Amino acid sequence: MSGLNIVFAASEAAPLAKTGGLADVAGALPAALARLGHAVTVIMPFYRQPVAASQVPVRPLGQSISIWMDGAERIAPLHEATVGPVRFILVEQDDFYDRDGLYGPPGGAWEDNLPRFLFFNRVALEAARSMKRPVDILHCHDWQTGLMPLLLATQYRHHPELAATRSVFTIHNLAYQGVFPAGWIGRLGLPEAGFHFRGYEFYGQINCMKAGIAACDALTTVSQTYAREILTPEYGCGLEGFLADHADKLTGIVNGLDESWNPAADAAIPARYAPGRMAGKARCKAALQSELDLARAEDVPLLVMVSRLAEQKGVDLLLDRAPAWLERGWQLAVLGSGEPAWEAMLARLAEARSRQMHFFRGFNEPLARRFYAGGDIFLMPSRFEPCGLSQLMAMRYGTPPVVRETGGLADTVVSHARSRTSSTGFSFSEPTPEAFDAAVSEAVAVWKRPATWRRIRARAMRRDSSWDASARRYAELYEGLVARA
């Protein structure tokens, strides 16, 4: 079977608007599916500021959708953009989406996030109804679209254009579930019959993630290990029992990278290189040391980290060990933002050791690419990581990562301690500073053995992290759902 009509509904998608890995998936996976011969449309809110910054041309579609919600009529003009083989439909509602922050101000969340995204869900379903060809697959992502499978199965199933549509719901990060007061049910016209413990009720409140899990035809998450982990109390975020009831439709499919992550063609890095042609890698390190005002030294390991500064990412483990690493003469560069206290600690440490350490507060993608290219060892000590993309980027740029054995990190990085002949990086199991330090020390010790390091680096760069293999798995899942319809 080929040529399915697939609609992605996502709260963000690269390159139009991005805060994290969800946008990368919602931007790159549709393109990979289109290369397999499927028609793919991505529907997302029209965030004017990031869309304008993306410089992707947007044009009015000449179509508006009217939705009654919370006692008032709202009219949403639709807009259209094209990125490669993928069509994007953008839902305009400026008082909802033209704000500083997709989900809230820095460090917070907008109080009206439920009506914001429920409105988007309803408009997206109406837009899907209006397509020239019936939709075969509606693929929804994270809590912001969790109510769509529920609405499809209840309030929209009678529409002939959506009668045969099958829904897929992907959990990108179970820690964020979209929990809101139950008082919104009547105000927003949610299906009251689904508000129970087997549906979208969660301790007397609305849980959008639960709604998607319960109502979807197929449930996926972004790595095989994370699919197993979320069935346990440690990672289930209070939904492990509920997820176990739906385990028969749960699949883990690891994420991939788009084609722009390629050190042989990346215009953001000072020198290009590839397996077998690695001279540019050394030039990238020297250039990064100069850019960050670090001491120019080939024989000193440069450890790099690109991350949100959140507890999930194990930043506290880094802060615990960084002073000792600097005492050993190593160099450290960190790019990221998040917890203000951790930002301040990193800044103080970098100021005190300015020739050994640099901290860039915020996010800058060209600079991040230079971190991946110029670093020797990449650090990713996450407490949990559904999939992770940074370790894939680091490997593709020949910077073997040190990761914690969790989620997608365990699925994508072959640890040197486990296999000397197929390793692509280093890992540790317990989320403690001591375990992290031991793994980083092992990586540095191996880095000092050039022949061994070259082999690890070459295997990391040659790892197939493209979206093509993952897209084929998604296509097989979609085709199975359609065949059973």
Image (tube, rainbow, N blue to C red):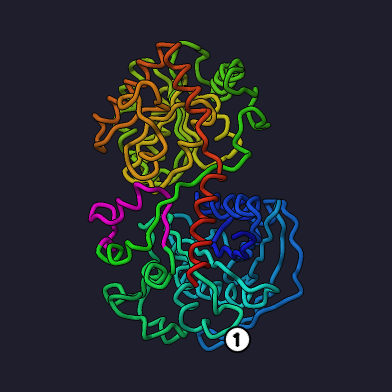
Instruction: Residue 349: give x, y in percent of width and height.
Output: 39, 29
Residue 44 seen by the camera: no
Number of marks present in the image shown: 1
Q: Quadrant of the N terminus?
A: bottom right
Is 320 in front, or is 57?
57
Left or right for 231, reference 275: left
Instruction: Verify whether residue 223 appears in magenta.
Output: yes
- The stretch in magenta equals 219-240
Image x and y of residue 256, in percent: 52, 44
Between residues 18 and 34, which one lies in front from this camera angle?
Answer: 34
Residue 422 pos. (x, y %) = 40, 25
- Where in the figure is residue 218, as x and y percent of width and height? 43, 64
Q: Quadrant of residue 273?
A: top right
Query: Which residue: 40% across, 11% down?
Result: 449
- The quarter holding residue 38 reads bottom right
Q: Residue at x 54, y 62 (%)?
A: 10
